[in-house]
Image (cartoon, rainbow, N blue to C red):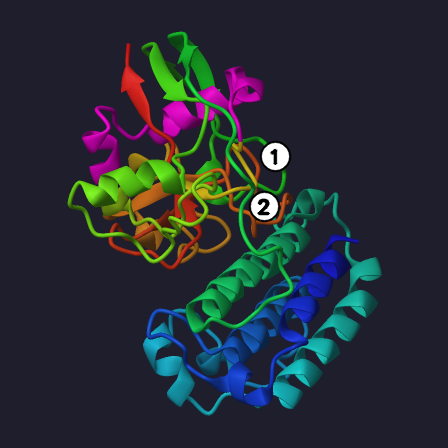
Amino acid sequence: MALEHARRRTEALLEPLSDEQMTRQVSPIQSPLVWDLAHIGYFEELWLLRRVGGRDALSSGYDDLYDSFAHGRAERGRLPILAPADARAYVGDVREAVLEQLPQLSFDDGDPLLRDGFVVGMVVQHELQHAETMTQTLALAGWPGSEPQGPPDVSASGEVLVPGGPFTLGSTDPWAYDNERPAHVIDLPSFRIDRALVTNGQYAAFVEAGAAAPPGWDPARPSLPVQHVSFDDAEAYARWAGKRLPTEAEWEKAARTVGPELEHMTGAVWQWTSSVFEGYPGFSAFPYAEYSEVFFGAEYRVLRGGSWVTDPLVARTTFRNWDLPPRRQIFSGLRCARDV
């Protein structure tokens, strides 16, 4: 079951950590790990027990403590959040109640939350996305994690021509998020895209030309994809290399049409695009505006593809990640493109 798969990842990631590590605020842009853990349980309770199950809240105080929009990440370490043992007990109690609740739900009725198991898929993906967020915290702290420790080597070179013409951007997957919908046809001119991600070795030349190296630049491992690159870094590198970043539409069309010719489109590093994060034509927020809509606008840029931490269930071709241009804590790199 997908719920169990996500929970195994969470437990394996956190099991080696001490209570002090679980409760420490490593960075103002990351939550304490114990907050993430309890928030995972809160989100599951909110949607699978309260919203579709009609149950009362296990604790009314959690609506404030563990709502992502009630308190910014920088202040969560100062909140009266659950201790590690209590957080583990809470998420366990929620999961026990969920497994009891699921057989009573109908996934083929008219409720769009339940149709095709959407609400279950949302809860699963939410937990898997937090596993990646927590791995970012481990990386910032320099603590070992249970995840594989980095992306695979790059071996490809050269470019691929992506012919111009129409293609369908977006998803019809039952578990796709609102920002991936609606699927719609767009027409793109021809462009070229690199077969490979930019490596540490290639980035070293950029650094030696006078740019500042991001935290993930490792000159001792030149064949690995450079990671922890901000959008600003990525755009500057592409310009320095005489190319540009692909738009997210170009990235998705390349993945759909010439994907087998491109190395590490998923499973290595998130890939910055030049696109701002905004809704597709006909966008409708579902099931809540705070997942996507509040982030729309020129402030955020889109990343595609998924990293070595991203679960394959999340890293579908249409999945859209986003972050602020200066941010480097994510496992992000780049692939260049250029006009024909």
Q: Which numbered mark, 1 or 2, is in the foreground of this view?
A: 2
The residue carrying pointer 1 sits among few (fewer than 14), some (14 to 19) or many (20 or more) residues within 10 Å by Cα, namely some
* Residue drawn at 74 percent across, 53 percent down: 2
The residue carrying pointer 2 sits among few (fewer than 14), some (14 to 19) or many (20 or more) residues within 10 Å by Cα, namely many
Query: Disc 1 on helix, strand or loop?
Result: loop
Q: Which residues are magenta?
A: 234-263
Displayed quadrant of residue 27: bottom left
* Residue drawn at 21 percent across, 43 percent down: 208
| 299 to the left or right of 329 | left
Residue type at mark 1? Asp
Q: Is residue 253 magenta?
A: yes
Which secondary structure dominates the residues rendered in magenta? helix
Residue tagged by mark 1?
Answer: 173
**Towards the viewer: 178 or 106:** 178
Distance (Cα) linking label 1 and label 2: 12 Å
* Residue drawn at 46 percent across, 56 percent down: 288
Q: Position of residue 108 (x, y in %)?
A: 75, 43
Q: Of all residues shown, which one is farthest toward the front?
A: 220
Label disc, if present, on residue 314 of the rendered structure? 2
